[in-house]
């Protein structure tokens, strides 16, 4: 994704849309629905797709890296990025993130794998073990910025990700960013589909997770 649109350019864009719409072909009831439900209309996605109708599932996800994920704003003021080694206090050192994921500004959604790492017939898997197994496999673990892009654009959440696993809600982890909670514990973010809407949560890496819940990874 390029640089964000400026105020002047946004005014020009609105004018271009106004001048090039065939208003005689616009249904009045549809127009009124958009006026009353502007927040539900996928106007941003329409513009980012160069004003072309999206048929079927969207294929590409654009990530605006000029507005990085901020745990204090998104979760709470006592939250931060985990810094330094996993066995430290998380307050000093480099932020624990997958630098390869941070370099991504656009992703082909068909290339994202939902990865699980159980050994044998494991039913439960500790979060820290899952994280280390993924790193050993060498894939790119998607970061909190990509998590937030999905959260802010739920219409881009792939249909397949909404499916339940073994009859249970599927939690999809974004292990490319490790966070620190107010008690100094290590957490990661996840997304899940709640029947009609997207949900999110923070999951402690120190507890056991269901081994069939996957992480979003690029090979």
Image (cartoon, rainbow, N blue to C red):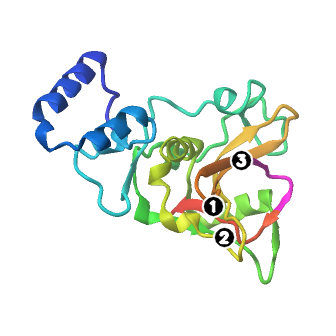
Q: Closer to the N terminus: mark 2 or mark 3?
A: 2
Q: Closer to the N terminus: mark 3 or mark 1?
A: 3
Above or below 53: residue 18: above
Secondary structure under tag 2 reads: loop
Picture residue at 55% right of the left edge, 64% below the top? 161
Above or below 50: residue 136: below
Please name whichever residue, 39 or 102, is drawn nearer the observer in this view of the structure.
39
* Residue 191 in the figure: left or right of residue 132: left
Pick out the residue farthest to the top. 8
The answer to whether residue 107 shows anywhere in this view is yes
Residue at label 2? Answer: 116
Q: Closer to the N terminus: mark 2 or mark 1?
A: 2
Disc 2 and disc 1: Cα gap in Å? Answer: 7 Å
* Residue 99 in the figure: left or right of residue 72: left
Indicate the quadrant where residue 27 lies.
top left
Looking at the image, is mark 2 or mark 3 nearer the viewer?
A: 3
Q: Tag on residue 215?
A: 1
Q: Which residues are magenta?
A: 202-208
Above or below 156: residue 151: above
Image coords of residue 158 (percent x, y): 48, 61
Crowding at label 3, few (<14), some or many (≥20) Cα neighbours within 10 Å? some
Disc 3 and disc 1: Cα gap in Å? Answer: 14 Å
User: Do labels 2 and 1 touch, CB within 8 Å?
Assistant: yes
Crowding at label 2, few (<14), some or many (≥20) Cα neighbours within 10 Å? some
Indicate the quadrant where residue 210 lies.
bottom right
Picture residue at 49% right of the left edge, 29% below the top? 67
Pick out the residue farthest to the front. 29
């Amino acid at each position: 994704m390029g640089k964000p649109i400026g105020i002047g350019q946004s005014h020009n864009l609105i004018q271009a849309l106004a001048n090039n719409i065939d208003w005689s072909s616009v249904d009045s009831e549809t127009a009124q629905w958009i006026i009353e439900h502007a927040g539900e209309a996928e106007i941003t996605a329409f513009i980012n797709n160069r004003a072309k109708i999206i048929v079927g599932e969207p294929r590409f996800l654009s990530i605006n890296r000029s507005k990085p994920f901020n745990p204090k704003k998104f979760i709470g003021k006592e939250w931060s990025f985990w810094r330094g080694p996993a066995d430290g206090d998380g307050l000093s050192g480099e932020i624990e993130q997958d630098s390869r994921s941070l370099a991504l500004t656009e992703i082909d959604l068909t290339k994202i794998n939902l990865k699980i790492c159980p050994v044998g017939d494991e039913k439960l898997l500790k979060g820290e073990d899952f994280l280390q197994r993924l790193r050993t496999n060498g894939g790119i673990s998607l970061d909190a910025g990509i998590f937030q892009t999905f959260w802010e654009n739920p219409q881009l959440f792939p249909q397949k990700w909404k499916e339940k696993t073994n009859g249970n809600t599927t939690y999809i982890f974004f292990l490319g960013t490790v966070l620190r909670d107010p008690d100094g514990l290590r957490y990661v973010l996840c997304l899940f589909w709640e029947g009609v809407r997207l949900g999110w949560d923070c999951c402690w890496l120190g507890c056991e997770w269901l081994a069939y819940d996957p992480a979003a990874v690029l090979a």
